[in-house]
């Protein structure tokens, strides 16, 4: 496509090697960019839209978003299961059209009960698309999936930044028409994404037989493997969800800590997001080496544990009654949480794929996504009612518990790699050998 040279030039500027996955790998990066620009337009004004345009009070807005988020929990496992049985690109296309319909119909909805099913559909579609996009990338990039994931995360952060800045500029007008235009932009972005998905070829999969045509595939009955009966993978996913709370600590806990318990300038509550985005864009690709192989990823959990412990300690230290010392502690905390985010994302991408059997990757990644979605739901309540309420001791305990989870996860992963329960290979591949039909 015409945008491919632009992506390649941007990759050279950021010192990114050739993008894995060929044309479809590059096209999926454009899909992610457009998706996140649209999401950036909407995420920054979601609550404001429901209050200013829909006329809901703050309590009903919170209830609306909470119930919608719960509905989204079903998206990851269901989408993963469907991707093992149907062509992945068709499932992803349907999900993106569902997201577009949800956003565009929301423009016509009024009142809590009309908005609730649309918010639920949007949340369901978002979590489904996240799992399907990851599965597509794992299949199309093969052994280079760690490097591809790092490039993809860089693109995602750029998209969120562009969308968020555009929304901030538009909000200067402060009219209801602006809110509607931002929601319209979000909905239309999914239409564009759906058109791009329609141009993607079906990637090879252990559960599909691909014909001689690049975009044609027929289903092969998958083996009867269920992640719900795999205690080792479930344990890995649960521990990963616990470690995933570092994101909630950065986006919810640290800003509230700045505002309520420290002498640091309140403006830092917004600056930590900018700092996080800039660091991820600059360093994510370079840190993808921590997910180069399953063993490297497992060993990387030890420095992750150290950074998690450091995050809790410096956040607790921010209560010191000195403006500059508190500011320094907050900035170190934001950097530490961001390092955890970058390394753990590379580790999680690699391990969640290679620990799953080739013929049930969709179902396994669906369960993995469900665990992360659950962490998103309970995380804000946990961080506000337990960690922040516990004061400095709460943050120290938070860092220690997450560090222990990382070390326990490393032990579990090494044991599974040494004695794989589902496949005879010592190290699972993300893409199985391709069967080509003569028909």
Image: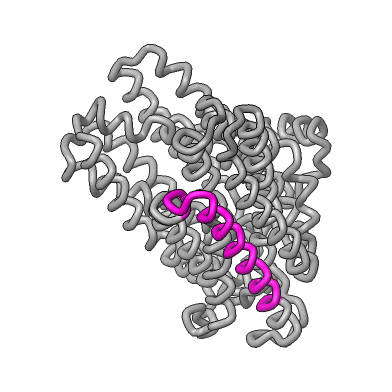
Main secondary structure of the magenta stretch: helix
* Of residues 286 and 242, the one drawn nearer to the viewer in this rendering: 242
* Of residues 357 and 386, the one drawn nearer to the viewer in this rendering: 386
Rendered position, 13 above or below 145: above
* Of residues 200 and 308, the one drawn nearer to the viewer in this rendering: 308
Residue for point 49% across, 66% down: 366
Residue for point 71% across, 82% down: 415
Whole-percent x and y of residue 141?
Answer: 71, 56
Whole-percent x and y of residue 392?
Answer: 54, 50
Is 78 displayed left or right of 165 in the figure?
A: left
Is 295 displayed left or right of 396 in the figure?
A: right
Which image quarter holds the C terminus?
Answer: bottom right
Residue 42 included in the magenta stretch of the image: no
Is 185 displayed left or right of 84 in the figure?
A: left
Rendered position, 65 above or below 426: above
Whole-percent x and y of residue 173?
Answer: 37, 12
Would residue 422 be visible to someone looking at this image? Answer: yes
Rendered position, 159 above or below 75: above
Quadrant assignment, res 140: bottom right
Residue for point 72% across, 58% down: 306
Residue reaching furthest to the top: 173
Is 50 displayed left or right of 35 in the figure?
A: left
Residue for point 37% across, 63% down: 74
Quadrant assignment, res 419: bottom right
Which image quarter holds the N terminus?
Answer: top right
* Of residues 429 and 402, the one drawn nearer to the viewer in this rendering: 402
Residue reaching furthest to the front: 321
Whole-percent x and y of residue 197?
Answer: 53, 46
Quadrant assignment, res 172: top left
Would residue 218 be visible to someone looking at this image? Answer: no
Q: How is the image coloured?
A: one colour
Q: Which residues are magenta?
A: 387-413
């Amino acid at each position: 496509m015409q945008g491919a040279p632009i992506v390649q030039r941007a990759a050279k500027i950021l010192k990114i090697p050739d993008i894995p996955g060929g044309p479809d790998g590059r096209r999926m990066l454009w899909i992610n960019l457009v998706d996140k620009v649209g999401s950036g337009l909407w995420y920054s004004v979601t609550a404001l839209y429901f209050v200013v345009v829909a006329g809901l009070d703050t309590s009903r807005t919170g209830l609306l978003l909470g119930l919608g988020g719960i509905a989204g929990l079903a998206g990851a496992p269901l989408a993963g299961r469907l991707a093992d049985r149907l062509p992945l690109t068709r499932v992803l296309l349907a999900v993106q059209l569902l997201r577009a319909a949800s956003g565009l119909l929301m423009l016509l909805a009024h009142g809590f009960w009309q908005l609730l099913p649309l918010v639920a559909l949007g949340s369901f579609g978002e979590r489904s698309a996240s799992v399907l996009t990851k599965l597509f990338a794992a299949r199309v990039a093969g052994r280079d999936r760690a490097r591809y994931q790092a490039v993809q995360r860089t693109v995602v952060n750029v998209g969120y930044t562009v969308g968020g800045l555009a929304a901030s500029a538009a909000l200067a007008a402060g009219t209801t028409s602006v809110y509607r235009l931002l929601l319209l932009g979000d909905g239309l972005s999914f239409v564009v994404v759906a058109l791009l998905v329609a141009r993607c070829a079906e990637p090879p999969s252990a559960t599909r037989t691909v014909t001689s045509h690049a975009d044609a595939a027929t289903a092969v009955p998958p083996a009867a493997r269920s992640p719900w009966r795999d205690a080792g993978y479930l344990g890995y996913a649960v521990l990963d969800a616990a470690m995933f709370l570092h994101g909630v600590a950065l986006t919810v806990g640290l800003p509230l800590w700045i505002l309520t318990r420290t002498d640091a300038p309140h403006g830092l509550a917004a600056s930590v997001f900018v700092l996080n985005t800039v660091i991820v864009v600059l360093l994510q690709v370079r840190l993808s080496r921590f997910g180069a192989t399953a063993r490297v990823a497992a060993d990387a959990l030890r420095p992750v544990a150290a950074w998690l412990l450091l995050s809790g300690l410096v956040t607790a230290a921010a209560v010191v009654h000195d403006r500059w010392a508190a500011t320094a502690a907050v900035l170190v905390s934001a950097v530490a949480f961001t390092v955890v985010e970058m390394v753990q994302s590379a580790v999680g991408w690699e391990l969640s794929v290679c620990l799953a059997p080739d013929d049930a990757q969709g179902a396994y990644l669906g369960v993995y996504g469900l665990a992360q979605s659950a962490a998103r739901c309970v995380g804000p309540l946990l961080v506000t009612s337990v960690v922040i309420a516990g004061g400095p001791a709460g943050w120290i305990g938070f860092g220690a518990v997450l560090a222990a989870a990382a070390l326990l996860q490393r032990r579990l992963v090494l044991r599974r790699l040494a004695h794989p329960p589902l496949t005879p290979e010592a190290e699972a591949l993300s893409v199985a050998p391709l069967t080509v039909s003569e028909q």
